[in-house]
Image (cartoon, rainbow, N blue to C red):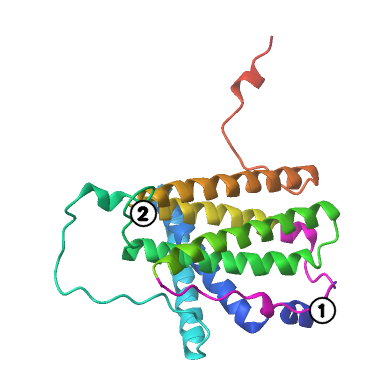
Amino acid sequence: MMSTSMHRDYFSDTFALLYLRNMGIAGTVAYSLGVACSFREDIRAFFNHNLKTAAELIEKSTTLLLSKGLLPRAPFIPYPDSVEYVQKESWLNGLVGDRRPLNIAEITQSYLNTLTNSLGQSLMMGFAQVAQSAEVVRHIVRGRDIATKHIEVFTSLLRDDHLPAPTTWETEISSSTEPPFSDKLMLYQTVSLSAVGLGNYGAALSASTRRDLAGIYLRLAAEIGTYADDGAELMIQNKWLEKMPGAVERDALIKT
């Protein structure tokens, strides 16, 4: 059993707050879906309660990070003086020819996906130096490298329009190699964050109207999907993946 101090000191307080904020954001998305898909009154009440606590987690962590000057702010753009309508179909371009600057929705998604990948990159870096299984280490290192590559993609999109990108958080991890977490927990977190990343890319895809961005998000989502699938297979090999209840296998009940 690892000591509480080892759990607390492995990642910095700043990183812990950023991680909690990110989990709160992921929670609001998941619990909103739970509310929308539930019909029993007690189940709806359960998800509504969880939705409220996730929102409170975002609020408290954001307030504390801002008060300490630790939360990187999204880029500012000039406030528009009037409504402007799109005049040409080329406004959708991005693959060839004249490419317009990112709009506010696209800036927001690029910035948020840079930030979440930065958190994932640092988390995987920390996990990799304490994981015990060679297979788990290789999978986590692969996730770190994917996150690093995706950060470069989103950072370049922002910098092409002379916009700032959020910082990375590698320095918020200690140099300890003593495992404060089990391989099972770290691999589960890795697979779960991959699923969150897929959801983020799906939301970004729906909010982006420049055609080149659609191609970027589809390509990055495919890479994350393959990585998440490989992580799930590794969990199955180790007998760590709990089976979710599902439809009855009717064919298996038929006696032949």
Residue beneath disc 1: 3
Q: Secondary structure beneath disc 1?
A: loop
Q: Is residue 184 magenta?
A: yes
Q: Secondary structure beneath disc 2?
A: loop
Residue sitting farthest toward the bottom: 68
Answer above or below: position of 19 versus 157: below
Residue drawn at the location 67% of the way across and 68% of the way down? 123
Q: Is residue 109 left or right of residue 223?
A: left
Mark 1 residue type: Ser
* Nearest to the observer: residue 49 or residue 113: 113
The circle on residue 143 is: none
Residue 110: percent from left, percent from top: 44, 63
Image quarter where the C terminus lies is: top right
The stretch of residues the image draws in magenta is 162-187
Labels 1 and 2: the sequence-earlier one: 1
Residue drawn at the location 27% of the way across and 77% of the way down? 78
Residue 14: percent from left, percent from top: 60, 82
Dividing the picture into quadrants, the one containing residue 129 is bottom right
Answer above or below: position of 16 versus 31: below
Answer above or below: position of 127 versus 254: below
